[in-house]
Amino acid sequence: MNYINAGDRSGCLSFLSGITNLSLIQCDLSCFLAQQSLPPVNSLSLEFLTDVCIALEKLEMDKSCRGLVVTSSQPKVFSAGLDILDMYGKSPEHCAEFWKAVQEMWLKFYGSNMITIAAVNGSSPAGGCLLSMTCDYRIMADNPRYSIGLNETKLGIVAPFWFKDTMVNTVGHRATEMALQLGLLYSPAEALKIGLVDQLVHEDQVLTTATETMTKWLAIPDHARQLTKSMMRKPTIDKLAANREADVNNFVKFITKDSIQKSLGMYLEMLKRRKA
Ligand SMILES: CCCCCC/C=C/CC(=O)SCCNC(=O)CCNC(=O)[C@H](O)C(C)(C)COP(=O)(O)OP(=O)(O)OC[C@H]1O[C@@H](n2cnc3c(N)ncnc32)[C@H](O)[C@@H]1OP(=O)(O)O
């Protein structure tokens, strides 16, 4: 396999492209985080989201690239979700830019023509769970210390309709209602039971299982698989595409409220205290 450093600004995005037309995005922010003093949990910051979108766009245009494995090189965390620091104490303009980037990431991943497999090698709360749900297949490390789910209500925030729609499309209406109202984070075994992930494997096997799975998916003719994927996902994608501006305005109005800012501040404090 060739190792191509494709990081535009941060040098944090890298791709492994191999003989099976398989590319791999490592959601690895360690280098970037070290430079920027951001926490090493693959939180989806504005800069990271922008880099990922550019990288994905390039892969999408490369017709020789038919599949993508999304994973993290952090040992215990797939992604901590959206970077709270991009939503806390920031101007409405910054929040709007940030939210546009979150929308863009979702639209690009959920609408990708490529086969996308999430190799969930650690915890994956909130936006991390969303990112994995945009993929066609999820393989998670079978370690009870890890969790996955949309826990927004626990932060005092509300998952927007397209987060909800993505989860409904993945696990169904009832499971989503329970998950969202209670802000549930599931253990790998629980996530498998409700269909939030498709397969559990030992943590050492996540990436190899992902590549084996990719080989099976690559055997399906692209045009038939792509049209089927589009038929399944287009209504959900169209709903956000037709309402992007309203969704941004809604987010900015909500996130800049004093009460919401206070909740986010308390949540950040709790994360820091938990460590101490
Ligand atoms: C209409 C309005 C709609 C609004 C919708 C907005 C939707 C938001 C979705 C989101 O994604 S919000 C983010 C939710 N994420 C979380 O709740 C995850 C919180 N993090 C964790 O549970 C843990 O960090 C972890 C991922 C399980 C990893 O645990 P670990 O023990 O390995 O690391 P920590 O010590 O907890 O963390 C290290 C360091 O990182 C900071 N941090 C963690 N997560 C985030 C984050 N999402 N954003 C920013 N910073 C984060 C944490 O505070 C620590 O910081 P320091 O103490 O080292 O400064």
Image (cartoon, rainbow, N blue to C red):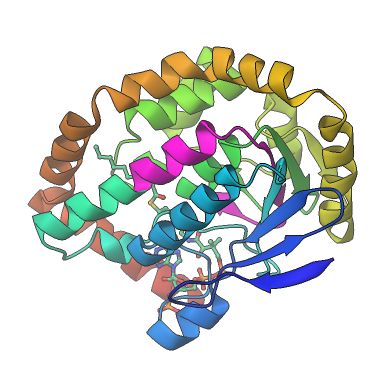
How many numbered marks have been drawn onto this rendered protein structure? 0
Looking at the image, which residue is at 13% across and 50% down?
259
Asked whether the viewer can see residue 276, the reply is no
In the rendered structure, which segment of residues is drawn in magenta? 102-126
Please tell me whether residue 46 belongs to the stretch shown in magenta.
no
Q: Is residue 184 above or below residue 49?
A: above
Q: Is residue 48 above or below residue 185?
A: below
Looking at the image, which residue is at 46% across and 63% down?
43
The image position of residue 250, as x and y in percent, is 16, 35
| Left or right: residue 172 compared with residue 46 | right
Looking at the image, which residue is at 68% across and 44% down?
187
Q: Which of the 4 image quarters holds residue 122? A: bottom right
Looking at the image, which residue is at 27% across and 47% down?
99
The quadrant of the image that shows the N terminus is bottom right
Asked whether the viewer can see residue 176, the reply is yes
Q: Which of the 4 image quarters holds residue 45? A: bottom left
| Left or right: residue 71 compared with residue 257 | right
The image position of residue 172, as x and y in percent, is 57, 16
**Regarding ligand 1, which quadrant of the image does it lie in?**
bottom left
| Left or right: residue 129 compared with residue 245 | right
* Depth check, front residue: 60 or 53: 60
| Left or right: residue 78 compared with residue 268 | right
The image position of residue 2, as x and y in percent, is 79, 69
The image position of residue 90, as x and y in percent, is 16, 64
Please tell me whether residue 109 belongs to the stretch shown in magenta.
yes
* Depth check, front residue: 70 or 22: 22
